[in-house]
Image (spheres, rainbow, N blue to C red):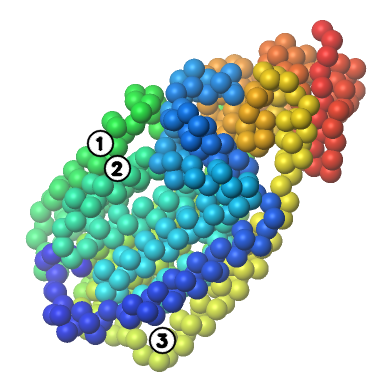
Amino acid sequence: MDPTEQRYTAAEHQAAGPGRLLLLLSSVLTVAFLSRFQLRLEVVRGVDVYYHLAVAREMLNSGPLERFPWTPYSLFAERFADKELLFHALLMPLTQLDLVSAGQLGALLGQLAVVAALAGVLWSWRSPLAPLLVLGLCSVGPPLAVRLSMCRPHSFTIAFSILALGLLCSRQSRLAALFLVAGAHGLFHSGGWLTVGFAALYCMTSLLNLPGQPRQLQLQPLGAALGGWLTGQLLHPNLPLNFEVLWLQNVTVPLGASAAGETALSAALGGELMPSTLPEVLSNLPGLLVLGATATALATRPQLRSRATITTATAALIFTLLAITLMRRMWELSGPLSLLALGATLVQAAQFRDKVFHTGRALLALAGLALLLGAANTHRLANQWISEEAPPELMARWLAKNGTPGDLVYTAQWGDSAPLLWFAPQLRSLVALDPTFLFAADPALFSAYAATITGADPDPISTIKSRFQARFVTIWKVPPFASLSTAARQDPRAQLVFEDQHYEVFELSGP
């Protein structure tokens, strides 16, 4: 897989490479399986999609945003930097559709990107069992299926990560393509710097004592990735604020979600950035077994160790450990990268005629059984985790009809600002998508916001009126917001004007 490794003859390429039709069929089946989770719903999957489609709609109407007046207390109020610029550009045509169709098609684009990236890389590597590895996306665990069912830029980070590793570990130098992938990745998502990290990891493997390879540091891939990412950021229309936003998103947010972070910010960020529970780890057992089998083969068979196999396996291991110990959302990268690492190891095994991964009938039968069991596990748990309701939608529609332009809506659940942005762009709210940008603008004000939710504020209605100048308060009917709901119901200045099974809306009046 590296330039210094053995190369196939044309005949061996043809014999080892998977059939195009079989690989295409497996890709179609994988997309069909993954897309079912959102296509069966009649509601939007996740509150983030409201934000992404609303920003895309504004871009379609007026071009890239430079201010974000919908959130007057946020860092973005007067200076906005779109950290998902190309993703929103991709969504612009979809904003002409109805909301549900736009969200479903946006999610489908992400699924197509991930499946196409994995299938394309495995085909270019001539990986044995490539169709089965692509089908493995259905089986590695439910977090991947849940993530891909949402119209979010994270799907493209998965796809770009696969592409970057595929280019780094290709048989021939692909520095120009790596440069372009790094630049595009950085403009699609704030996690685009991962391409640079993968390149650094690949360069470090050049110092290892590997069979048939000189120990000499090679920095060209790192230079291409770093140059591409930096070029993309320098072309960003919101330069230089985009660099500040990247720091907040990639450093402040993870630290804020950990024990080392600000307590109020940690509480507001929610569970997605918290460590995995034991049931969550067990739900990803198929992906863990894939990574375990690959790691065992590399540990016991030196001939399988190459820059490609070590790079991909190490990347998969890093994200797996992060998912277990720090941020459960990393499972969405752990599974696909584990499949990629297995693909790299299969290529190396085929080159050295190693029988540890021979393609005999017994192995194929075992792999097929594992795929079926893993897909059943994903199907069962993902359906349990994916809600068939859109709790904030009726609340947001009511405010769109009854609010007046410029009214500020105090959203106890910060994510409720996103549906308001889509349904009621004439109103203002707190943060739109991420509480970090309220925290960054005014930590003291953010602490006051957090205190009204946790019950630490003895008079939350006064705080909401005086410090936030809010006319409406929206409260999600879940335990974390029970104290604020009780305070609002007991305060004569708060009048309940809307209520359904999910939400309460209070209108504030008086001093």
| One can see residue 257 in this view | no
Q: Residue at x 82, y 7 (%)?
A: 511
Say whether marks 1 and 2 touch (CB < 8 Å).
yes
Q: Where residue 111 sits: x, y (%)? A: 48, 59
Precedes in sequence: disc 1 or disc 2: 2
- Amino acid at the residue labelled 3: Leu
What residue is disc 3 on? 363
Tell me the number on the disc at residue 231: 1
Q: Residue at x 45, y 81 (%)?
A: 367
Q: Residue at x 32, y 61 (%)?
A: 312
- In the rendered image, the residue lying farthest to the top is 511
Q: Secondary structure at mark 3?
A: helix
Q: Is residue 257 left or right of residue 226?
A: right
Q: Amino acid at mark 2?
A: Gly
Q: Is residue 379 above or below residue 486?
A: below
Q: Residue furthest bottom?
A: 361
- All told, the count of numbered labels is 3
Tag of residue 183:
2
SS of the residue under disc 2: helix
> Dot 2 surroundings within 10 Å: few (below 14), some, or many (20 or more)?
many
* Quadrant that contains the N terminus: bottom left
